[in-house]
Image (spheres, grey):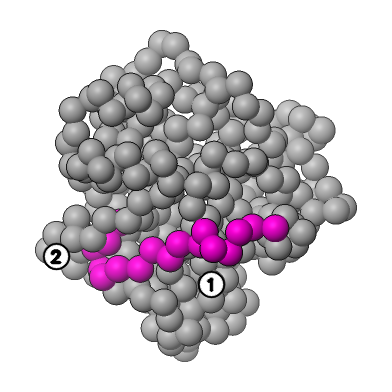
Amino acid sequence: MLPEEVLRQPARILSRAQREFYFAHGYLAVEGLVERPLLDRLHAVTAEFVERSRKIRRSDAVFDLAPSHTAESPRVRRLKTPDAQHPLYWEYAQGIIADVVADLVGPDVVFHHSKLNFKWHDGGDEVKWHQDIQFYPHTNYSPLTVGTYLADTGMDDGPLMAIEGSHDGPLYDQYDGRGQWQGCLNAEDAASLDEAKVRHMTGPAGTITVHNCRTVHGSRASRRQDGRPLLLNAYSSADARPYTPHPTPTMHTLSVVRGTPTRWARHDPRPCLMPPDWSAGYTSIFASQAGENAKAAAPMLEQSPVGAT
């Protein structure tokens, strides 16, 4: 659906002003949406996974670990696919935030993926400026990501930041000069961003953030010792169909969480950069931006088809 069509649909959670703000600026932050009992449950489960990571020495299918990770000082950069790791995360992905998404993409909503990112003072946790849709192109630009702060997040915690209005600007090339995927803007493009349009999304635990798949966003390194967890769930309208392999599929990928499936895909005429072939595996944006995925060197159409040998 186009924004004007979405706005004609009755709101479930958000006010009309909040919906219009998202369409105009490409991002949104809402405080107090997640009730404390649910937030406490999410926080407790997350703490269990951090504790479990003490026994893990290197990144695997569940954890993406910072180079400084040790049993004594666990440094989890990302809990991968939390929707598949614990039923509470999937319960949450189908709950109130799915209603928020319906207010922004229309009544038919499809789940795409989830991840749980952490900020640590010494974990190399900066996320450079990037856009999401180049990681997983769709036939239109309805995909968005809902973040949930599981802990109070102020300026010292490396909050999510977005370039206001950038969803209506260009898509950037996220390969480096050697043709290797880096998952972020190159230095020249990053330097060209209008710093006056940087918006920091801070808030107490339970605040949600929303950003469109075209919105340029990132976060600075944390300056606090305690880990700051940010639970991220990505969705799209049901008329947005992916046209590259999913980088981190689970049993919930492409599940309809609101409304019904659609038979017709809507195509946005604006082009999209192709990502690498993720069939060999994907770790995280932290690994990509740190150059740990050097073998992902060319767009997918220049590599072997998925499943080829």
The residue drawn where x is 52% and y is 42% is 167
Judge left or right: residue 74 versus residue 290. Answer: left
Q: Earlier in the sequence, mark 1 or mark 2?
A: 2
Rendering coords of residue 159 (x, y %): 43, 69
Between 21 and 36, the residue placed more toward the observer is 21
Judge left or right: residue 137 versus residue 115. Answer: right
Rendering coords of residue 265 (x, y %): 48, 16
Q: Quadrant of residue 273?
A: top right
The residue drawn where x is 37% and y is 44% is 22
Between 305 and 242, the residue placed more toward the observer is 242
Q: Amino acid at mark 2?
A: Arg
Mark 2 and mark 1 in contact (Cβ < 8 Å)?
no
Q: Is residue 176 visible?
A: yes
Label 2: element kind:
helix
Q: Amino acid at mark 1?
A: Arg
The residue drawn where x is 55% and y is 23% is 268
Task: Give the label on residue 36, or none.
Answer: 2
Rendering coords of residue 173 (x, y %): 73, 45
Instruction: Give the answer, above or below, for where 39 lies relative to 102.
Output: below
For disc 1, the marked residue is: 220
The residue drawn where x is 54% and y is 84% is 122
Quadrant for the N terminus in the image: top left
Find the distance from the CA under tag 1 to the CA under tag 2: 27 Å
Q: Residues within 10 Å of mark 1 (few under 14, many from 20)?
A: some
Q: Quadrant of residue 172?
A: top right
Rendering coords of residue 121 (x, y %): 50, 83
Which range is magenta?
A: 192-208
Farthest residue, direction front: 196
